[in-house]
Image (cartoon, coloured by chain):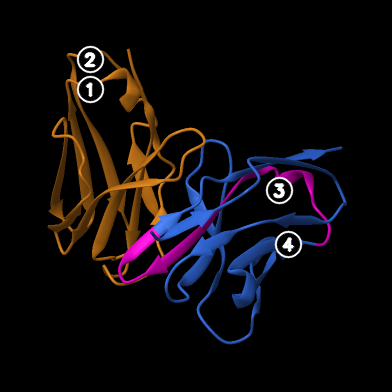
Amino acid sequence: AQSVTQPDIHITVSEGASLELRCNYSYGATPYLFWYVQSPGQGLQLLLKYFSGDTLVQGIKGFEAEFKRSQSSFNLRKPSVHWSDAAEYFCAAYNNNDMRFGAGTRLTVKP
Amino acid sequence: ETGVTQTPRHLVMGMTNKKSLKCEQHLGHNAMYWYKQSAKKPLELMFVYSLEERVENNSVPSRFSPECPNSSHLFLHLHTLQPEDSALYLCASSQDRGSYEQYFGPGTRLTVT
C-alpha cells in the first residue's frame, strides 16, 4: 500500500544547530514529494517540492531536501535552525490524484 | 483578502448539535478539499470537490455532509457528532483536481463534548 512515513515524532535541536527531518515513502513508482510546515494555529505551508531532475531541491526559509531513490527517502535539512522554525513538519507524496501525508514531526528549538 | 480562509477558527459543540464549517478561497482555484487532522496521525482526506462536483468521498460517516455551492466556497455540515470527531479540520484548494500544489487554510479546531 502507498504510504509516507516520518520516523521521528518529535525532535529537539538547539538554535543554530543543523537539522535533518526524515521521510520515507512506499510507492510503486516515484511520486511527487513535498514538505509542508505548520505553525501553531495555522494551516500547512508548502516549503518545497520535488518532481524530477536535480535531487537536491531548495525551498523557502532556508530549507532544502534531498531525494534518494535507492533509499526511498526525501529528507528535509537546514544548516542552522532559528527559533522561529519551531513547528510541525509534514512530508507528503502525490501520485495519480492521490496525496498522502506523513504523521508529522514536531520540531522544538532550544535557546 | 487572499488565500484560503476558514470560519470559525474554534468550535465547541454537543453531540446533538448541528453546526457548519465554512471555507473560502480567493485564489481562483477549481478544486477544494476537506481534511481531518488528529493528533499524531496523518492528515485524512475527507472530501474532494472539482468544479463544484464531489469527486471523492473517502468513507466518511454521514454525520459529515459537505456542500460546495460555487468554486470559491466549501462547507462542512456537522450533525450528531461523536467525541472522537474532535480534531482540526483543514480546508485546502488547488488549481485543478490534478494539481498537486495545495493551499491550506488555518483550520477549524472542533471539540465535541
Q: Could you confirm whether marks 2 and 3 are on the same chain? A: no
**Residue range of the region highlighted in magenta in the rendering:** A79-99
Q: Is residue B2 visible?
A: no
The kind of secondary structure element at disc 4 is strand
Q: Which chain is blue?
A: A
Q: Earlier in the sequence, mark 2 or mark 1?
A: 2
> Gap in Å between the C-alphas at discs 2 and 1?
5 Å
Do the numbered discs 2 and 4 sit on residues whose CB atoms are within 8 Å? no
Residue at the (60%, 58%) spot, across then down: A23
Instruction: Check whether the beta carbons of the residues at disc 2 and disc 1 lie within 8 A of each other.
Output: yes
Q: Which mark is residue B15?
A: 2
Amino acid type for the residue under numbered disc 3: Asp
Q: CA distance from mark 4 to mark 1?
A: 40 Å
On the same chain, marks 2 and 1? The answer is yes
B51 and B84: which is toward the camera: B84
Q: Nearer the viewer, residue A38 or B80?
A: B80
User: Which mark, residue A85?
Assistant: 3
Residue wearing tag 1: B81
What amino acid type should be assigned to the residue bearing mark 2? Answer: Met
Please tell me the colour of chain B. Answer: orange
Q: Chain of mark 4?
A: A
- What's under tag 1, amino acid-wise? Leu
Marks 1 and 3, Cα distance to the nearest angstrom?
35 Å
Q: Which residue is mark 4?
A: A77
Residues beneath discs 1 and 3 located on the same chain = no
Q: Do labels 1 and 3 touch, CB within 8 Å?
A: no
Q: Secondary structure at mark 1?
A: loop
For the residues labelled 4 and 3, say whether their Cβ atoms are less than 8 Å apart: no
Parent chain of label 1: B
> Is residue B92 shown left or right of residue A47?
left
- Horizontal side of A110 relative to B59 (left or right) equals right
Q: Is residue B28 magenta?
A: no
